[in-house]
């Protein structure tokens, strides 16, 4: 198996393109190589805290010009998924930061606040993702609504995310808090479920045969790629290690140290 048939890449961001607020070495050169080769790409992240525009601004700060339509967040994927099943105006309680709130509102849902929930307001859905702004009250009111019958939906199950100082608790940790308090498991929309991968392929006009996922986490990026029928490329610049592959029983198709090594290999292949 070679990289030759890959025409489109779905790229995870944190741990692949940057760590926290630090770009990976060779980031600018990586995207220049993709454009030079005419490859399609979509940036797909389980992080639901930011909007696509916020990610374009972050990338611009790193010296890379990426249009918002190239970016798929788990917040957008979750909101789009719910809009397929629920009418505009449906009451939704959100445990999340700006990205998730904006995505849910953009789909026409009515957002229930923690105070409204405490005052007796009901919601059809509780949607939870990573939230630096989360407090006990915010999560407790989400659990309360689930106990009252609301559907529990999670943007992604990531237990941690890579930072400059090492892994820190992620969305999965917040979901576990609510699940423990309710006994209800959430429906997961983000990686490793195939929904985000399908949305990303639609944006690129790609197919499973000519698309690969580049990620740093075996149990979301790589497993998700396998679930969606894609080739899977693991980079060792984020969370997962070679030792984790044996422990988790998840095998990528390719392994690279980082995006710099991918740039070198693909550049050599086209020379």
Image (spheres, rainbow, N blue to C red):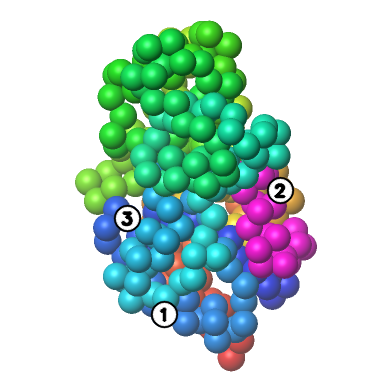
Secondary structure, magenta segment, majority class: helix
Kindly state the secondary structure of the residue where label 3 is placed: strand
Compared with residue 266, is residue 19 higher up or lower down, i.e. above or below? above
Q: At x 54% / y 55%, what residue is drawn?
A: 72
Per the image, the residue denoted by label 3 is 19
| Sequence-wise first label, 3 or 1 | 3
Q: Is residue 204 magenta?
A: yes
| Sequence-wise first label, 1 or 2 | 1
Q: Nearer the viewer, residue 228 or 146?
A: 146
Per the image, the residue denoted by label 2 is 228
Q: At x 29% / y 36%, what residue is drawn?
A: 132
| Sequence-wise first label, 3 or 2 | 3
Residue 155's spot in the image, x, y percent? 52, 37
User: Could you tell me if the residues under marks 1 and 2 are in contact, i.e. CB atoms within 8 Å?
Assistant: no
Per the image, the residue denoted by label 1 is 29
| Residue 240 picture quarter | top left
Give the magenta part as a residue range: 191-210
In this rendering, position of residue 41 left or right of residue 29: right
Picture quarter with the N terminus: bottom right
Kindly state the secondary structure of the residue where label 1 is placed: helix
Q: Nearer the viewer, residue 106 or 184?
A: 106
Q: What is the CA distance from the residue labelled 3 to the residue labelled 1?
A: 17 Å
Q: At x 58% / y 11%, what residue is drawn?
A: 149
Q: What is the CA distance from the residue labelled 3 to the residue labelled 2?
A: 26 Å
Q: Is residue 196 magenta?
A: yes
């Amino acid at each position: 198996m070679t990289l030759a048939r890959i025409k489109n890449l779905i790229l995870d961001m944190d741990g692949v393109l940057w760590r926290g607020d630090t770009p990976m070495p060779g980031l600018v050169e990586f995207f220049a190589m993709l454009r030079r080769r005419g490859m399609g790409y979509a940036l797909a992240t389980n992080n639901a805290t930011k909007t696509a525009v916020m990610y374009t601004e972050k990338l611009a700060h790193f010296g890379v010009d990426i249009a918002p339509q190239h970016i798929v967040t788990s917040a957008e994927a979750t909101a789009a998924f719910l809009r397929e099943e629920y009418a505009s105006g449906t009451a939704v309680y959100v445990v999340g930061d700006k990205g998730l709130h904006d995505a849910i509102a953009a789909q026409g849902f009515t957002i229930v606040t923690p105070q409204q929930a405490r005052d007796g307001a009901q919601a059809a859905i509780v949607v939870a993702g990573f939230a630096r702004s989360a407090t006990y009250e915010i999560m407790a009111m989400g659990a309360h609504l689930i106990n009252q019958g609301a559907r529990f939906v999670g943007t992604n199950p990531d237990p941690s995310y890579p930072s400059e100082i090492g892994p820190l608790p992620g969305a999965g940790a917040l979901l576990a808090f609510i699940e423990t308090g309710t006994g209800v498991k959430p429906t997961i929309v983000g990686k490793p479920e195939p929904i985000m991968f399908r949305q990303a392929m639609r944006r690129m006009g790609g197919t499973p045969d000519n698309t690969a996922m580049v990620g740093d986490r075996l149990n979301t990026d790589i497993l998700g790629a396998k679930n969606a029928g894609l080739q899977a490329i693991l980079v060792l610049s984020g969370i997962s290690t070679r030792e984790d592959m044996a422990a988790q029983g998840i095998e990528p198709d390719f392994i690279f140290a980082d995006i710099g090594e991918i740039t070198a290999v693909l550049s050599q292949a086209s020379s």
